[in-house]
């Protein structure tokens, strides 16, 4: 069905394996999901809509103000035509499935812009925002953004965790250890000194948790050198794309740290593939005013083909 085509969801099993590996990120839209159902809505003899009903660990309990170890999650909604009643029927079916699992609370993660307003019309409000950035394999790091020629990027070993900890704590204030079974851990050296790092997932070709450079070495093209090495590894493995995710710290504005990170990835040849918004039921006196990415940060939007 051409109206349901999507560049990432070409094969359901492959897509769900990819999403399952992204669960390492523990974000609102990628977090160790278990599919409960692939739900369809029929009209006459045709399929009008589909969505996936998931069960996920409840990482955002404090943000929601609710208790529980797990919550429901709705993703990959496709409706043709897009209308409130069709979406309402699909969500009612999803709620029944979740109720059978003893789950009452659920969120909706959606990246297709026309769906956002329809979801809000059904009483859901945005609570989280994230950006998925992609590089096609013919992408190059643009001149003059090429990496620092004095930087050497090597594969790290488990014995180098102390250096990785220092870099991440200097870059963003805390440390997430790598999974050496799943990730190629790239470590950038300036002379003998480790200055930057990235975890490239072998299964998803995703840079898990982003590129990090020790604070005193930032803005010296260290991160660009790491990105170039990661892109080359993806090419050697026959990947179609390389990815990185940025979860934004605020809904109604782009703060300076997020703006700098997004500009870095885009200036290095990446393109915005999707902006995910997380929705949950919450009554507000008026809809939130969320500035578009391209207005807030002068970012370009990439439309992936095939």
Image (cartoon, rainbow, N blue to C red):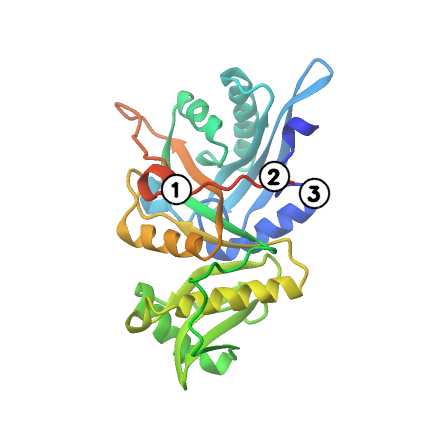
**Residue 62 shows in this picture:** yes
Residue found at the very far bottom of the displayed protein: 192
Q: Position of residue 147 (x, y in %)?
A: 45, 69
Query: Residues under labels 2 and 1: Cα distance?
Result: 24 Å
Q: Closer to the camera, 85 or 67?
A: 85
Circle 3 residues within 10 Å: few <14, some 14–19, many ≥20:
few
Q: Which class describes the residues within 10 Å of circle 1: few (<14), some (14-19), or many (20+)?
A: many
Placement of 19 over or under 85, stated as above or below: below
**Residue 87, x across and y down, in percent:** 53, 22
Instruction: Classify residue 209 as left or right of residue 242.
Output: left
Considering the numbered disc 2 on the image, is that residue within a helix, a strand or a loop? strand
Residue hosting label 2: 36
Identify residue for label 1.
Answer: 129
Q: Is residue 31 visible?
A: no
The residue that appears at 40% across and 25% down in the rendered structure is 120
**Circle 3 residue:** 11
Q: Are marks 3 and 2 in contact (CB under 8 Å)?
A: no
Dividing the picture into quadrants, the one containing residue 202 is bottom right
């Amino acid at each position: 069905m051409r109206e349901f085509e999507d560049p990432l969801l070409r094969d359901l099993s492959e897509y769900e394996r990819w999403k399952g590996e992204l669960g390492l990120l523990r974000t609102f839209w990628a977090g160790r999901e278990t599919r409960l159902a692939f739900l369809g809505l029929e009209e006459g003899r045709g399929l009008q809509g589909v969505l996936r009903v998931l069960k996920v660990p409840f990482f955002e309990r404090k943000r929601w103000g609710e208790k529980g170890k797990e919550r429901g999650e709705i993703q990959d909604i496709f409706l043709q035509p897009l209308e409130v009643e069709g979406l309402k029927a699909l969500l009612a079916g999803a709620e029944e499935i979740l109720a059978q699992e003893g789950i009452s609370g659920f969120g909706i993660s959606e990246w297709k812009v026309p769906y956002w307003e329809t979801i809000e019309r059904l009483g859901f409000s945005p609570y989280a925002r994230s950006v998925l950035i992609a590089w096609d394999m013919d992408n190059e790091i643009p001149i003059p953004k090429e990496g620092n020629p004095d930087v050497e990027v090597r594969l790290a070993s488990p014995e180098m965790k102390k250096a990785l900890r220092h870099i991440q704590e200097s870059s963003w204030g805390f440390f997430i250890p790598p999974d050496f079974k799943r990730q190629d851990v790239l470590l950038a050296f300036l002379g003998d000194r480790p200055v930057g790092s990235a975890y490239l997932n072998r299964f998803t070709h995703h840079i898990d948790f982003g590129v990090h450079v020790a604070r005193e070495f930032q803005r010296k093209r260290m991160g660009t050198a790491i990105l170039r090495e990661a892109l080359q590894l993806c090419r050697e493995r026959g990947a179609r794309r390389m990815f990185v995710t940025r979860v934004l710290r605020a809904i109604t504005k782009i703060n300076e740290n997020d703006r700098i990170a997004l500009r870095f990835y885009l200036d290095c040849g990446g393109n915005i593939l999707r902006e995910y918004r997380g929705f949950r039921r919450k009554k507000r006196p008026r809809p939130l005013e969320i500035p578009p990415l391209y207005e807030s940060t002068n970012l370009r939007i990439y439309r992936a083909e095939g």
